[in-house]
Image (cartoon, rainbow, N blue to C red):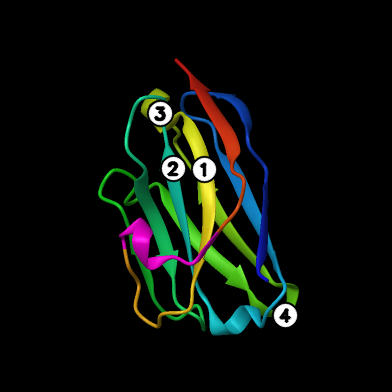
């Protein structure tokens, strides 16, 4: 069974940067498309970013384009989300997700496994 464990969340000020990490275990990491989603209180889960199995392709949600980057280290079974120029509206619980599908989806239902989430709070 796949397990995903996120880390790196915290309380930061607007304009700061934060690096989230997600460690994957239980299956062959390089066989999974990886993604980050987020969910703020009272709001629907929102797609943030996805990365292909090889790391050769990425996809971002409109609200984070140009500020966030996603990367993966297949030998270390890890995916990262580098968040720059953070805004108060980025405040949410961030979830790591894994999909056995080859395409980069922005739909949460396409992902088979989820982490427990890590909280990011951005103060103004």
Q: Is residue 98 above or below residue 30?
A: above
- Residue at the image point whose x is 41% and y is 80% from the top: 101
What segment is highlighted magenta in the picture?
A: 106-113
Q: Position of residue 33 (x, y in %)?
A: 48, 74
- Quarter of the rendering occupied by the N terminus: bottom right
**Callout 2 crowding tier (Cα within 10 Å): few <14, some 14–19, many ≥20:** many
User: Which residue is tagged 1?
Assistant: 94
Q: Position of residue 7 (x, y in %)?
A: 69, 46
Marking on residue 87: 3
42 falls in the magenta region: no
Comparing 36 with 63, the one in front is: 36
User: Which residue is tagged 4?
Assistant: 75
Q: CA distance from mark 3 to mark 2?
A: 14 Å
- Secondary element at image label 1: strand
Q: CA distance from mark 1 to mark 2?
A: 4 Å
**Callout 4 crowding tier (Cα within 10 Å): few <14, some 14–19, many ≥20:** few
User: Which residue is tagged 2?
Assistant: 38
Would residue 57 be found to the left or right of residue 117 on screen? left
Q: CA distance from mark 3 to mark 1?
A: 14 Å
N-term-proximal mark, 4 vs 2: 2
Q: CA distance from mark 4 to mark 3?
A: 32 Å
Q: CA distance from mark 4 to mark 2?
A: 26 Å
Q: Position of residue 25 (x, y in %)?
A: 72, 70
**Res 10 quadrant in image:** top right
Asked if disc 1 and disc 2 are in contact, CB closer than 8 Å, the reply is yes
Comparing 26 with 29, the one in front is: 26
Q: CA distance from mark 4 to mark 1?
A: 23 Å
N-term-proximal mark, 3 vs 1: 3
Q: Residue furthest left?
A: 62
């Amino acid at each position: 069974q796949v397990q995903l464990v996120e880390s790196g969340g915290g309380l930061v000020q607007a304009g700061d940067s934060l690096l989230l990490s997600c460690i994957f275990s239980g299956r062959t990491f390089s066989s999974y498309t990886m993604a980050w989603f987020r969910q703020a209180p009272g709001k629907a889960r929102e797609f943030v970013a996805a990365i292909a199995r090889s790391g050769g392709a990425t996809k971002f949600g409109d609200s984070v384009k140009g500020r966030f980057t996603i990367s993966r280290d297949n030998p270390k079974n890890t995916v990262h989300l580098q968040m720059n120029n953070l805004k108060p509206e980025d405040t949410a619980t961030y979830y790591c997700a894994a999909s056995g599908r080859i395409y980069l989806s922005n739909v949460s239902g396409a992902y088979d496994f989820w982490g427990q989430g890590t909280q990011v709070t951005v103060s103004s």
